[in-house]
Image (cartoon, grey):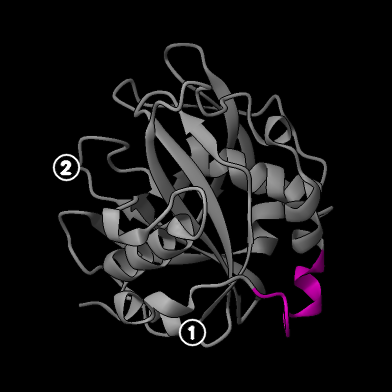
Amino acid sequence: MTRADEARGAVTLSKEGLPDWLAPVVRAAETVQPIQLSSFLPPENGAGRQSAVLILFGEGARGPELLLMERAGSLRSHAGQPSFPGGALDPEDGDPHADGPLRAALREAEEETGLDPSGVQLFGVLPALYIPVSGFVVTPVLGWWRKPSPVGVVDPNETARVFTVPVADLTDPANRATAVHPRGHRGPAFLVESALVWGFTAGVIDRLLHYAGWERPWDRDKRVPLDWRS
């Protein structure tokens, strides 16, 4: 049984005691509309596999930072991509339209990075989005790393590495670009921590920076090609 399982009765949202710099993120989470985050929204017929990711903000040596991981190259979906910790809801996580995504986000983050969920304060939930290529309906759960704990690769079959990225690097125009998929799709990308963050994860980060008022003007004509296998 994981620590997240042991805390099943106490998974709630709370804005109490958050650092002042998180206030713009809280406001964005309370006001943003689904279409403002992505044009890919959950199918109206309810299709799609329910899942959740944890967008975990911490405070590092260079100020606010986000926890990310790189998925193992052997996985069937989104192999090798940097991402937020997260995954599909299990039946024991509960109602996907209630606190199920909160439990799933913490459980998956613990399983993938080894973090102690008791040190995470969940403070918001973004609208559910859709990833057409994998059929996942993803609920982004926002957290504050109130009591940081050691993190790292738990299972090499799932995770290649775990790392944090300073928000200052994500907002640095020099680290921003437009990723171009061989099929013609384009989207925001970040070149940080020896990684190219793109796809769903980059899209959510891009919109969070924008609606939190942290975005800085960047060159949208700067392009990076994606590998044909992506």
Residue 129: x percent and y percent?
A: 54, 36
Around disc 1, counting alpha carbons within 10 Å, would you say few (fewer than 14), some (14 to 19), or many (20 or more)? some
Q: Amino acid at mark 2?
A: Ser
| Residue 135 sits above or below residue 66 on the image | above
| Residue 145 sits above or below residue 171 on the image | below
Q: Residue at x 38, y 58 (%)?
A: 94
Say which element carries label 2. Answer: loop
Query: Which of the two discs, 2 and 1, sits closer to the camera?
Result: 1
Around disc 2, counting alpha carbons within 10 Å, would you say few (fewer than 14), some (14 to 19), or many (20 or more)? some
N-terminal label among 2 and 1? 2
Q: Residue at x 49, y 60 (%)?
A: 99
Q: Are marks 2 and 1 in contact (CB under 8 Å)?
A: no
* Relative side of 201 to 2, left or right: right
Q: Amino acid at mark 1?
A: Gly
* Residue to which mark 2 is pinned: 74
* Relative side of 150 to 155, left or right: right
The picture quadrant where one finds residue 23 is: bottom right
Q: Residue at x 50, y 23 (%)?
A: 43
Residue 109: x percent and y percent?
A: 37, 65
Q: Residue at x 21, y 54 (%)?
A: 158
Q: Is residue 74 visible?
A: yes
Say which element carries label 1. Answer: helix
Magenta span of residues = 14-23
* Residue to which mark 1 is pinned: 119
Q: Nearer the viewer, residue 141 or 76?
A: 141
| Residue 106 sits above or below residue 222 on the image | below
| Residue 52 sits above or below residue 44 on the image | below
